Image: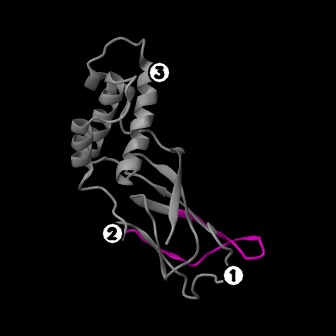
């Protein structure tokens, strides 16, 4: 099953504030605040890319080629709400699905087909789109917060050379290991 996702800007406050990042970086001046705010946003996105986990409330739109089985696995979490399931019919029209159930007890979260089953009149390639909200509510697990701060520090100190170094990547990956969403 082919699946991909698009990440919107966070809809809630990011869990690392400008003051948090500046304290971690041991900065007291305000002349680089705009840069640090951009690094906070970049670290949030990098955590999503590395672990498929949203530190802050974020809207995700995930595409699937079709309804392949009784469940659709949602790649990013923790999922708090599914706002829409839509698909492109074979005639090109767009339709929505209702009656599905969200199973977000474990990870990854999944959508369970309505009792009537998923629609069968589905176009080819990238026909199904699920829009959902994911992200931690307070408190964010400390290892994820620390991973964000490590990424911010790395990006701040290595502005011209952005690929993650081996030590930083291993540290961040280790911090995120218990939270990483693995596809089944």
Q: Earlier in the sequence, mark 2 or mark 1?
A: 2
Q: Which mark is residue 121?
A: 1
Image side of residue 23 versus residue 134, left or right: left
- Distance between mark 3 and mark 1 Cα atoms: 49 Å
Which of discs 3 and 1 lies nearer the camera? The answer is: 1
- In the image, what residue occupies the spot 64% across and 84% down? 120
- The colour scheme applied to this rendered structure is one colour
Q: Assign a secondary structure to mark 1.
A: loop
Q: Quadrant of residue 16?
A: top left
- Distance between mark 3 and mark 2 Cα atoms: 38 Å
- In the image, what residue occupies the spot 52% across and 79% down? 68
Q: Assign a secondary structure to mark 2.
A: loop
Which is more toward the observer, 170 or 40?
170
Q: Is residue 90 magenta?
A: yes
Q: In the image, is residue 102 above or below residue 161?
A: below
Q: Assign a secondary structure to mark 3.
A: helix
- In the image, what residue occupies the spot 38% across and 30% down? 162
Residue 114: x, y in percent?
A: 55, 82
Q: Earlier in the sequence, mark 3 or mark 1?
A: 3
Look at mark 3 in the image and give the residue it sits on.
34
Q: Which mark is residue 106?
A: 2
Residue 13: x, y in percent?
A: 45, 39
Which is more toward the observer, 76 or 84?
76
Q: Is residue 154 magenta?
A: no
For the record, the magenta segment spans 82-106
């Amino acid at each position: 099953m082919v699946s991909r996702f698009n990440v919107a800007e966070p809809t809630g406050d990011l869990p690392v504030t400008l003051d948090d990042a500046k304290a971690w970086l041991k900065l007291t001046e305000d002349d680089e605040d705009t840069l640090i705010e951009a690094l906070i946003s970049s670290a949030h996105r990098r955590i999503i890319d590395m672990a498929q986990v949203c530190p802050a409330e974020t809207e995700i739109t995930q595409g699937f080629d079709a309804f392949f089985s009784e469940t659709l696995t949602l790649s990013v979490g923790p999922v708090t709400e599914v706002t829409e399931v839509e698909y492109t019919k074979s005639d090109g029209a767009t339709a929505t699905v209702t009656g599905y159930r969200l199973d977000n007890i474990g990870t990854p979260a999944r959508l369970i087909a309505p009792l009537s089953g998923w629609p069968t009149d589905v176009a080819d390639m990238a026909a199904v789109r699920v829009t959902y909200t994911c992200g931690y509510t307070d408190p964010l697990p400390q290892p994820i917060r620390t991973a964000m701060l490590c990424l911010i520090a790395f990006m701040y100190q290595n502005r011209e050379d952005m690929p993650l170094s081996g030590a930083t990547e291993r540290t961040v990956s280790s911090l995120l290991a218990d939270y990483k969403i693995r596809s089944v």
